[in-house]
Amino acid sequence: MAMSSKKGRRGKKSKPLPFTRVNYILFAIGLAGIVLGNIFLSIGPWNSFWSLDFAPVMLVLSYLVIIPVAILYHKNSDTSDANEGAI
């Protein structure tokens, strides 16, 4: 019997992906907010509540809050590693 050897990254440690499921969910919420903000911006008369008040606030929150939070969010699951170096 011949032993089959697998070639690949057997000895290397694989790094976890930079984004988790929470990041993708937040990003999807931000994209939905952008799409809904643009839709609300285009409906109704130009001086309606939806066009003047709601849509710009939704767009600003989506672009400046939700999308950056989705990119920068990182859950620190291992806090003991940071404390090991301190004496």
Image (tube, helix red, strand yellow):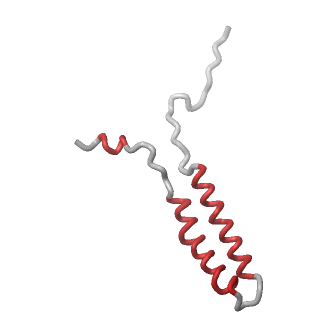
Which residue is at the far right?
44
- On the picture, is 72 further left or further right than 57? left
Identify the residue shown where x is 48% and y is 50%. Answer: 75
Identify the residue shown where x is 71% and y is 81%. Answer: 41
**Quick one: quadrant of the C terminus?**
top left
Question: Residue 82 appears at what percent x and percent y?
Answer: 34, 45
Q: How many marks?
A: 0
**Quick one: quadrant of the N terminus?**
top right
**Measured along the vertical axis of the image, is residue 40 above or below residue 79?**
below
Which residue is at the far left?
87
Question: Residue 26 appears at what percent x and percent y?
Answer: 60, 59
Question: Residue 49 appears at what percent x and percent y?
Answer: 68, 85
Which residue is at the far top?
1
Q: Which of the two residues, 85 or 12, is positioned nearer the viewer here?
A: 85
Q: Which of the two residues, 14 or 78, is positioned nearer the viewer here?
A: 78
- On the picture, is 81 further left or further right than 60? left
Question: Residue 71 appears at what percent x and percent y?
Answer: 54, 59
Identify the residue shown where x is 56% and y is 60%. Answer: 70
Which residue is at the far bottom?
47
Identify the residue shown where x is 70% and y is 72%. Answer: 36
- On the picture, is 17 further left or further right than 50? left
**Measured along the vertical axis of the image, is residue 4 above or below residue 34?**
above
- Residue 34: which quarter of the image? bottom right
